[in-house]
Amino acid sequence: MVLLTTAHKGCANVMANVLARDGRVEPPLVACVVSDANYSLPALRATKECVIAIPALALAPKVVVVGNCSGRRVEKFEVFGLTPCQQSAFRAPNSRVLRESRMSVADTRLANKFNLFVLEVLKAWFDPTQKNPKTIHHHGHGRFTVDGEMVKLKSGKP
């Protein structure tokens, strides 16, 4: 579960979404589908940029309410107490959660047909104040799985 933030024509919006990660390292890519019904879609299409934030467990209640309303009717940053911050020339604000990455649309071929955006990670940030954060994985209708015990297996990589 992630929070996807866009901004266009002075309007910022945040929505709940899911990602699929590509296995390559350079350039790092992720993919997401944004429905035609989502208020964020026109902004993502127009600006070709967004911020993806991975929320920790403490933010789960806000993830649910953000995902259950439309930015067409609600200014989500204000109503749900999310603190946007601007760290670069990107128009989209982030919401300072567990970690966030600034994304740029790398390929629009599938976006035009399926609303599937292949996003290139341009910058990533991790909140060092969060000690041992637990991430959430959405199962639908307000149900989440929370990260459990960390298991380290021998892999030949650090």
Image: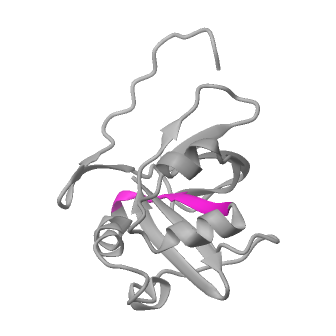
- Decide if residue 96 is in sight here: no
Q: Quadrant of residue 42?
A: bottom right
- Decide if residue 20 is in sight here: yes
Q: Seen from this angle, which residue lies furthest front?
A: 113
Q: Residue at x 70, y 29 (%)?
A: 25
Q: Quadrant of residue 64?
A: bottom left
Is 50 covered by the magenta stretch?
yes
Nearest the eye: 136 or 37 = 37
Q: Seen from this angle, which residue lies furthest right?
A: 89
Q: Residue at x 44, y 59 (%)?
A: 55
- Percent position (x, y) of residue 92? 66, 72
Q: Residue at x 63, y 63 (%)?
A: 45
Question: Magenta part mainly helix, strand or loop?
Answer: strand
- Percent position (x, y) of residue 103? 68, 54
Q: Residue at x 67, y 69 (%)?
A: 46
Q: Is residue 79 above or below residue 42?
A: below
Q: Is residue 68 above or below residue 23?
A: below
Q: Is residue 27 left or right of residue 4?
A: right
Q: How is the image coloured?
A: one colour
Nearest the eye: 138 or 17 = 17
Q: Quadrant of residue 62?
A: bottom left
Is 37 covered by the magenta stretch?
no
**Magenta span of residues:** 49-57
- Percent position (x, y) of residue 127? 60, 60
- Percent position (x, y) of residue 108? 65, 48
Location of the C terminus (image quadrant): top right
